[in-house]
Amino acid sequence: MSSFDYPILSRSDIISILAESQIAAVTDNDFKNIKPDFVSNLYTCLLIYLDALNEEDQGQVEFSALEQIENPDLLIGSFQVMNLYSRLRDVMASLNCPMQFNLRDLIKPDPRRTEHFLSGILNFCLYKETKLNLLRPIVEELALLDDQRKEWEAKISQLNAEIAGYSEARERELPLIQEVESKVKELREMIAGLNSNQMSLRTSFRNLKEKTGQMDEKISKAEFDLVQSVQENANLRSKIVQSPDKLQRALEEKKLARDEAKNAERSAIQSFQEKTATVEVYSKALKKMSKHFAMMQAIHEQVNSAKSVEKECKGLKAKLSDDVVLDKSLEAKLIEREGKVGQLEEHKRQLQKERDLKFEESTKHLNSVKSEVLSKRCELEARQKKVEDVVAEVDSITIKTSMVRESGAAKVQQLISKCEEIVKQFQQSSSSIGLLLPVDGNGTKTTFD
């Protein structure tokens, strides 16, 4: 049903709709033998289903109204009936029912009118269910959007806290980073100088290696020459006897050669000592350079960690910008939803105002009806007292007539028994007299008339 209409439902449709909606369990016999209690209970279940009546509000009256009544306990049922009647009349008026709902429809219900009113209320129930089914996905979507908004707000607050922590850590670490950058610059300059020194030392070390190779070659040659001179000396010693002059000359030459070899050996030892000193200097420089290189590696690792922190910070900033854009889109959607909610709240306020106005009108009418009912109730109580008096008189008269009837019946029975005895005695006496009477010529006995 796209719009609310007012078709008259059949009795079977009414029973099936009530059963499907779980409002009440009704049978066809209930409508055939319709009773006021059945009708009031059915209307109460329908009003509770439509949220037009609460179970706690049934029969409740204001204390100011109760103070004006002498015996309010006797009027609880009438209060419930009038409350139900006022609510049903408001509902029928809001449904634009063509028939006017009156108090007789609760006290002495008519099946045709009851089915008509039930058709109207059930049609409105079906219309309400269809509208609620159409609005349910929108409400669920609003709930999901609200949950998502809360999740995004929690995430945004968490990211803002993380960003604040990172910014605070960055502000705390800024002087350290500046000191590290200055040290890195100094170390880079130192590394450049050490690299140049290392290159010069490498070149000098290569030169020294070449010189040491040359000196080793010279030493090996000198040793070879020394061995040859020793052999020649041995040969000369063996030849001393043969040629002393030649030997003297050879000795002199050998002495000169030995002096030269010793001088060369001395110079080689000095050069070797100089080379060992330079090698020690180079080893010390190498140790210092390795220490500086380890420090450079540690500083380089710190620089890399600082760069990774900067990259993470940039990534977080990018994520924050994305979250800000997403937050803006969610805020736009939230504003739209809030606008819709505002419209719905305005519509709800209008409906509440209309309901309050109708409630005031119904309360006024209910008060007037209550006063009329109270006056009529007083008249009915007076009539009831008169009727009770008349009924008591009638009961006494009926008791007297029953007593008279019982006494008359007893007397009649006595008379009947006496009559029967008299008849028996008469028959006996007539039979005895017949025996005593003479017989006629025809052979018949004379009888007494």
Image (cartoon, rainbow, N blue to C red):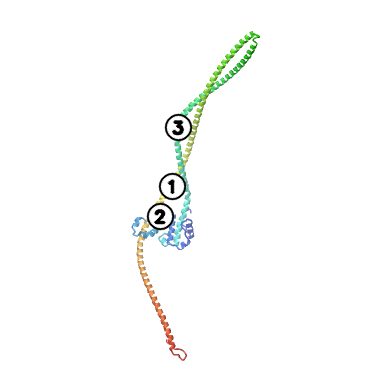
Location of the C terminus (image quadrant)? bottom left
Q: Distance between the residues labelled 1 and 2?
A: 30 Å
Q: What element carries label 2?
A: helix
Numbered label attached to residue 341: 1
Numbered label attached to residue 173: 3
- Judge the density around disc 1: few (<14), some (14-19), many (≥20) Cα neighbours within 10 Å: few
Q: How far apart are marks 2 and 3 (CA)?
A: 68 Å
Query: For the residue marked with disc 3, what is the amino acid?
Result: Glu
Query: For the residue marked with disc 2, what is the amino acid?
Result: Glu
Q: Position of residue 422 (x, y in %)?
A: 41, 82
Q: Which of marks 1 and 2 is nearer the N terminus?
A: 2
Q: Which of 62 and 142 is in front in this view?
A: 62
Q: Nearer the viewer, residue 209 or 27?
A: 209
Check disc 2 and report the residue beneath it: 56
Question: Relative to 102, is 348 above or below?
Answer: above
Q: Is mark 3 on a helix, strand or loop?
A: helix
Q: Where is residue 117 in the image (x, y as percent from the top left)?
A: 44, 59
Q: Where is residue 89 in the image (x, y as percent from the top left)?
A: 41, 57
Residue 416 relative to residue 221: left or right: left
Q: Do the residues labelled 1 and 2 touch (CB within 8 Å)?
A: no
Q: How far apart are marks 1 and 3 (CA)?
A: 48 Å
Q: Nearer the viewer, residue 208 or 245?
A: 245
To which quarter of the image does residue 446 belong?
A: bottom left
Question: Relative to 268, is 113 above or below?
Answer: below
Q: Answer whether residue 195 is visible to the viewer in this image.
A: no
Q: Are marks 1 and 3 in contact (CB under 8 Å)?
A: no
